Image: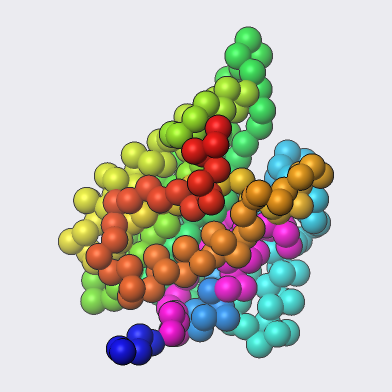
Amino acid sequence: MIQLPSLRLDGKKILITGVSRSLGIGATLARRFAEAGAIVAVHGFSDYDLTVGEKNSAAPNATEKLAKEYRELGLNVIALSSSNFAQTGTATKAVEEAALKLGGLDGLVLNHCYGTRVEIGQWTEEDIDPHLTVNIRAAMMMVQAFAMQADITNDNAITLFTSGQHLSPMTDEIAYCVAKEALNCLCRQAAWLLKGKNIRVNCINPGANDTGYYSGDTSHWGTPDDAADLLLFLHSSYAKWITGQVISSDGGMDFQR
């Protein structure tokens, strides 16, 4: 029997966004990538979690604290300057800062998001706009900045995060759903556009994840480690023939809706 090598990311230089809660997917991704040998830069915006997002495990300066905790465990994780991707220029600057501190990037994981629940009849421009700027505009600018600095001789990979909106209705989160659906399109278009630069682009739907924000029954939900398993594969050489794909890793939950 052929013995395949362990899945490792030794020497990979990867930027992960949305790392601002110890119980969140981003924090788990940073730890798991670093444990697999990657050099990881993390970006977060704690003010979002403290005011708008999932508040469980939210804390001021959480990204910096997580990076310090991981370094004390011997993991190669550095925190970038905190910034709000709703503000012009911040998304590009995050990629540029990561590339400068790590000496280039060959991996980009866009795990950040903005989301609120507002039903039709209550939509406002002020509610819609940050969904578009944070979830779509920032992602497009970061993909562009990553491509501009990518070394064509490397195996480069980008992973976007979508949701389950393409599988079943989420009618009280329309602005969020529209933005996430746009990321599915960005994935396919960018994969074709960037294949000549040796950049693979994929998008995952992690399904319902138990990140500490829900107090009900989560026994049928996934965990951040489930998402990390797929992301590690997509950023490894095992996934060298996979690009332009929207992949659901949700334990089949959407079949049950």
Instruction: Please name the residue shown 57% across and 81% down the image.
Output: 35
- Within the magenta stretch, is there residue 2? no
Q: Is residue 23 above or below residue 254?
A: below
| Residues in magenta, as a range | 6-32
Judging depth in this view, the residue of 142 and 40 nearest the camera is 40
Instruction: Please name the residue shown 47% across and 64% down the image.
Output: 231
Q: Residue furthest front?
A: 1
Q: Is residue 83 above or below residue 122?
A: below
Q: Position of residue 177 (x, y in %)?
A: 51, 31
Instruction: Please name the residue shown 66% across and 28% down the image.
Output: 117
- Within the magenta stretch, is there residue 24? yes
Judging depth in this view, the residue of 149 and 34 nearest the camera is 34
Residue 129 seen in the current view: no
Q: Is residue 55 left or right of residue 197?
A: right
Q: Is residue 115 left or right of residue 201?
A: right
How many discs appear? 0
Q: Position of residue 135 (x, y in %)?
A: 51, 41
Q: Position of residue 9 (x, y in %)?
A: 44, 79
| Quarter of the figure that contains the C terminus | top right
Q: Is residue 73 above or below residue 156?
A: below
Q: Position of residue 63 (x, y in %)?
A: 69, 63
Q: Quadrant of residue 119?
A: top right
Judging depth in this view, the residue of 111 and 143 nearest the camera is 111
Instruction: Please name the residue shown 27% across and 44% down the image.
Output: 189
Q: How is the image coloured?
A: rainbow
Residue 28 seen in the current view: yes
Q: Is residue 3 above or below residue 187?
A: below
Q: Residue furthest top?
A: 121
Q: Quadrant of residue 58?
A: bottom right
| Quarter of the figure that contains the N terminus | bottom left
